[in-house]
Image (cartoon, helix red, strand yellow):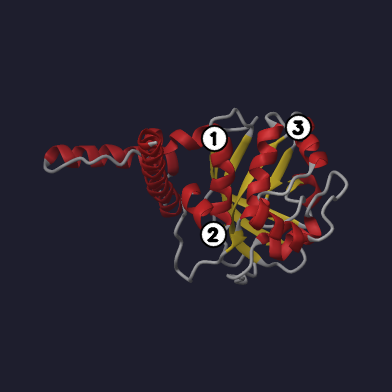
Amino acid sequence: MRYSLIVTCMLLTGMYCTKSFADVSYADLFLDRRGYKPVEDTWLDKSFAARFAREKGFPDNQLYKEWCINTFKNGEQIYEAYKEIAFYIDYRAEALKTDYWQTPFETRQSRQGDCEDSVFLFFSKLSELDIDGDIIWGWVVDGSSSITFAHVWYQLFDKRGSPYIVEGFSKDWNGIIPLETITGLEERVPTLMLSHGQVNHVVDEMIPIPDYGHGQEAAECSEDAQFRWSAYFSNTSTIKEIFHKLHDMFIRYREQMHNYCLSGAKESLSR
């Protein structure tokens, strides 16, 4: 049975030898060795594919598209969403002690981001669809070197219910990977898992942060909110931080899309 919300809190101290690779992504560290190519590779030169994406739009791979359609529900849309995170954006590490979550709008504008930015961009293309998948916050541990780093990834399930890991930035058609092919090569340790259908509504439904005002009424509302925090998340600071950042990112994203739609409407009226 799959659960819509899974929360696991853990202490890594003493469990793994943790190394920092702030300037590289999962694609740089592991994807060349662990990526999965289910069809014939139509791009022999990744740099050419990346340049093509920059100058002429996204590259295309009809065989990979057909594989996605045959493998996943809403496979054509999954193909388009993956193509964007694989070819369109470059990995950009953030400064130490900085963890700004870009909205999909900001990532498309800058054409760069890190792991959670890639995941949110992928999710944004599929958010209104019935997708069997999860957004996962957690840790990736390399089996041979014990390299460990915090990571955010998308977990996708095929028509038979088998899990796949979705990774961006590769400039290649190898980033939708059956979980079974990397089991043993690495360990993925979830801290928080949100189902695809839950993400759009989780901020409003599970961690409301209203403007309570002042006085006794505000205190009572605050206590009620704290009770709900405890009930859902055991009141852990790690989970709270994730949800606060989600809340802030979604608020900005809604405002940006609202302003974008308004500007488009005004432009249409002026023609």
Residue drawn at (61%, 61%) of the image: 90
In the rendered view of the protein, which quadrant contains the N terminus?
Answer: top right
Residue drawn at (45%, 68%) of the image: 97
Of helix, strand and loop, which one carries label 3?
helix
Q: Residues within 10 Å of mark 3 (few under 14, many from 20)?
A: some
| Callout 2–callout 3 Cβ contact below 8 Å | no
Of helix, strand and loop, which one carries label 2?
loop
Q: Which residue lies furthest to the left in this view?
A: 215
| Callout 3–callout 1 Cβ contact below 8 Å | no
Is 35 drawn above or below residue 205 in the view shown?
below
The amino acid type, in three-letter code, at marker 1 is Ser
Marked residue nearer the N-terminal end (3 or 1): 3
Marked residue nearer the N-terminal end (2 or 1): 2
Residue that badge 1 annotates: 127
- Label ID, residue 98: none
Is 199 drawn above or below residue 55 in the view shown?
above
Q: Does residue 168 appear anywhere in the picture?
A: no
Is 172 drawn above or below residue 265 in the view shown?
below
Q: Nearer the viewer, residue 46 or 93?
A: 46
Q: How far apart are marks 3 and 1 (CA)?
A: 18 Å
Residue that badge 3 annotates: 69
Of helix, strand and loop, which one carries label 1?
loop
- Label ID, residue 11: 2
Image x and y of residue 147, in percent: 68, 67
Residue drawn at (61%, 63%) of the image: 149
Image x and y of residue 141, in percent: 68, 60
Q: How crowded is mark 1: few (under 14 residues within 10 Å), some or many (20 or more)?
A: some
Q: Nearer the viewer, residue 152 or 42?
A: 42
Tell me which corner region of the image, top left, top right, bottom left or bottom right, holds residue 260: top left
| Callout 2–callout 1 Cβ contact below 8 Å | no
The amino acid type, in three-letter code, at marker 2 is Leu
